[in-house]
Image (tube, helix red, strand yellow):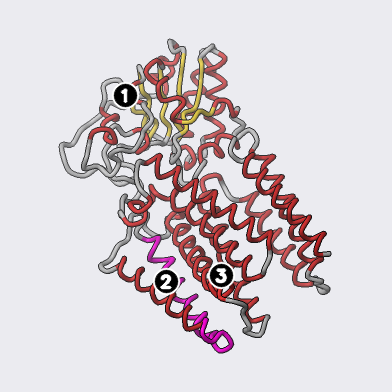
Amino acid sequence: MDVLSNVIYLIASVLFILGLMKLSSPKTARVGNLYAMLGMFLAIVITLLDKHIIDFTYIIAGIIIGGAIGAIAAKKVEMTQMPQMVALFNGFGGIASTFVAYAEYVNTNHTVGGTDVVISLILSLLIGTVTFTGSMVAFLKLQGIMPGRPIVFKGQMTLNALILIATAGLGWYFGMDTLNGELYLLIIVGIAAVLGVTSVIPIGGADMPVVISLLNSYSGLAAAATGFVLSNNVLIISGALVGASGIILTQIMCVAMNRSLTNVLFGAVGTDSGTAASGGEQRTVTRYTADDAAMIFENAESVIIVPGYGLAVAQAQHVMHELMQLLEKRGIEVRFAIHPVAGRMPGHMNVLLAEANVPYDKLVEMDEINDDFASTDVALVVGANDVINPAARYKKDSPLYGMPILNVDQAQRVMIIKRSLATGFAGEDNELFYDDKTMMLFGDAKGMLTDLNKILKEDE
């Protein structure tokens, strides 16, 4: 049975790796998910058989309840709520590691192995709990229950450092007497819960893609630590894969914003979404209509569409796909420019447009398409703000300074669909709104695109 278990675990691990490889491309992401699901299924089945679990009552109940919740969430949760759901899933993964590690300690009558197991147990409780409470804060911010702006207070970083020092001290005392050290573990869980909250509240809404990928990494590290507590190889491997991929993705997000992870975590950058630009001269722009936009498209040969979070909020992805089809019928080349941190989670725009059946080859990453804006007739921006703000290039006192942006301002004509002139999460006014070649189309993205599609159909 041990040989069979190790062979199945190896197969499951290979499937996990193949799944991650497939997830690197939108075209193969669904297959990657299937590989990973099959690997997890094999790992769970062989674990249950290997551990000789006879009474499956609780397991079956968990499968039914969890499966029902997952099925309902998959059907009911809108694309605009996907970041919140991912945050919740990260948190549930973290707290599951905490519960499993603690349950193993109780199940073994408080007898713990060597120092390596003690350290793994402490890390599992710490990281798993931090992941849970931090993810809950991220959920509340994304859901609008908590303010999206950074929440800071005096001595915040000192408090976080003291919690980590206290955890190390409590872990040392626990290691000295594991049989009677349960209280130490409970205290560690309690202060780790506080650490999760104080670590995430100072992070602004614009940095949520980084936070979500980092918390995803934390959940993997917690699982790997729990794997060492249980001496379960497949849990160690799968946790390490999630942890490593999450760290890599976090680094990609930071590079996309030209900011360090330290600055994201402790810089307290951002404001509430949709705040008005403050200070400076009050400026006005000309309001354009869907009819005006349709006239511009009449003479266009190439269009680059820049999707943003506003597209998701308006649930306008399907109408956007219809616009793409109408333009292509006229012989216009249409592509989508995807900024790495557009939206509220990594890959948010890719998922949103894929859900509307936009062909994968139409989705082009920033580095590949940026040079094409200069030769593009129309750049259509729907719901994006910070990722197209030219202040990132020249305004040194701006929180956006140095962040690579999409070169929308280099297009021959720029159309921006937006509800108002409000700033993005960074709180920086966008000079592009006032450019002579920019057409501001104020209104709900879905309504504006629907009107535009209707006009284009009438002109066919």
Q: Is residue 243 above or below residue 254?
A: below
The disc placed on residue 438 is 1
Residue 6 drawn at (x, y percent): 76, 59
| Residue to which mark 2 is pinned | 194
Residue 266 in the magenta stretch? The answer is: no
User: How many angstroms separate mark 3 from mark 1 (CA)?
Assistant: 56 Å
Mark 1 closeness class: few <14, some 14–19, many ≥20 residues within 10 Å: many
Q: Left or right: 123 with respect to 279?
A: right
Residue 359 drawn at (x, y percent): 60, 27
Q: Could you say whether the residue bearing mark 3 is in a helix, strand or loop?
A: helix
Q: Residue at x 41, y 19 (%)?
A: 378
Residue 181 in the magenta stretch? The answer is: yes
Q: What are the residue bounds of the magenta stretch?
A: 175-201
| Residue to which mark 3 is pinned | 120
User: How many angstroms separate mark 3 from mark 2 (CA)?
Assistant: 20 Å
Residue 407 drawn at (x, y percent): 36, 26
Residue found farthest to the bottom: 180
Q: Give the foreground label among 3 and 2.
A: 3
Q: Residue at x 46, y 46 (%)?
A: 344
Q: Give the foreground label among 3 and 1.
A: 3
Q: Residue at x 81, y 61 (%)?
A: 3
